[in-house]
Image (cartoon, rainbow, N blue to C red):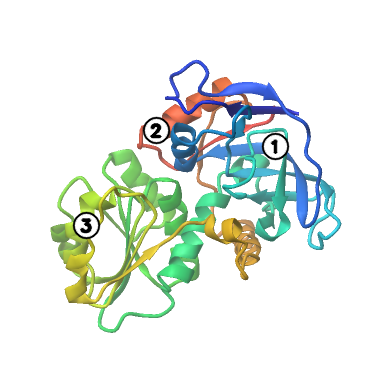
Amino acid sequence: MRAVAYKIPQPISAETSLLDIDLPTPEAKGRDLLVEIKAVSVNPVDIKVRASTAPAEGEYKVLGWDAAGVVKAVGPDVTMFKPGDEVFYAGAINRGGSNAEFQLVDERIVGAKPKSLDFAAAAALPLTSITAYEILFDRLKVQDPVPGAANAILIIGGAGGVGSIAIQIARALTGLSVIATASRPETQAWVKELGAHHVIDHSKPLAPQIEALGIGAPAFVFSTTNTSDHIASIVEIIAPQGRLGLIDDPKVLDIVPFKRKAISIHWEMMFTRPLFNTADIIEQHRLLTKIAELVDAGKIRTTLTETLGTINAANLKKAHALVETGKMKGKVVLAGF
């Protein structure tokens, strides 16, 4: 099968940072589906792994943790899918990625593709949807109010891939007032279009902008990027006994200032369930099913904003370079081989 992979972690500008190669087609066993890949999306995790993780000696590493495709074969223990089913999923970080013609994935982290979307539009959704859903309901538990706080969530980095879907999920499934940050006219317009009640500029001090809204201190803050740059502002903004969620990787994160307000800190990593085969791993199948239902009901839209052609090394290099700018609006997708 055709695939895109690498042997040596390098900057994306390097000639051999990503390569077109041929690999054996894997065989579905156990609860695995063998999926024929139709479209993939690129995320910051692809950039982090490519730049830092070497494959085993003599082997290639295939990236890709967002996909939509068609089930070609199933393992003997599969109960939820059959060949011919159209699916979407993020996969597992400790297994071969989706930048290949075929991929093995555990059925318990797979959802049926939204019927109203084509493969490209669907491929933009899984990783960010899982991340946003888990941070809202499993980590921050936004369904449980914070006494005396404004029933509101501040989403820092609202125009990125995760922020773009978090805004929509919060609007579709909660009564929260959604405050999103964006710093450019085009990204501010984007988050308003997605349903944010309020938009503030993260390139300026946050606290005065929150105060000017007149809604009170938000119960929840979800920081998707540059958390260390905003930590002092978050301490000032968030309500006593509030909850902070984050997904980025600050080199240093001093949480001591949150003690006075008894703020709880919640990490989200959407790969945790498949990585550790947790007892509740099937929750990712269930939440993707919920996302597909919301999409087909017209309550959530795809966050696809750019398509860069077919799945090959040259186009994936362009996608990686685009994501590396840190100025993405929504998601970038590649479709077909």
Q: Which sits in the foreground, 201 or 62?
A: 62
Element on which disc 1 rests: strand
Q: Residue at x 50, y 69 (%)?
A: 173
The residue where tag 3 is placed is: 231
Q: Residue at x 58, y 51 (%)?
A: 126
Three-letter code for the amino acid on which mark 2 is drawn: Glu
Three-letter code for the amino acid on which mark 1 is drawn: Lys
Q: Earlier in the sequence, mark 2 or mark 1?
A: 1
Element on which disc 2 rests: helix
In 3D space, how far apart are the residues under numbered discs 2 and 1 (Cα atoms)?
Answer: 24 Å
The residue where tag 2 is placed is: 324
**Residue 240 position within the rendered picture, expressed as x and y whole percent measured from the top left:** 22, 77
**Residue 277 position within the rendered picture, expressed as x and y whole percent measured from the top left:** 62, 62
Q: Residue at x 70, y 37 (%)?
A: 38
Q: Earlier in the sequence, mark 2 or mark 3?
A: 3
Three-letter code for the amino acid on which mark 3 is drawn: Ile
**Residue 300 position within the rendered picture, expressed as x and y whole percent measured from the top left:** 54, 56
Query: How many residues crowd mark 2 within 10 Å: few (<14), some (14–19), many (20+)?
Result: some
Q: Which sits in the foreground, 170 or 267?
A: 267
In 3D space, how far apart are the residues under numbered discs 2 and 3 (Cα atoms)?
Answer: 23 Å
Q: Residue at x 21, y 49 (%)?
A: 229
The residue where tag 1 is placed is: 38
**Residue 299 position within the rendered picture, expressed as x and y whole percent measured from the top left:** 54, 60
The reply to whether discs 2 and 3 touch (Cβ–Cβ < 8 Å) is no
The image quarter in which residue 160 lies: top left
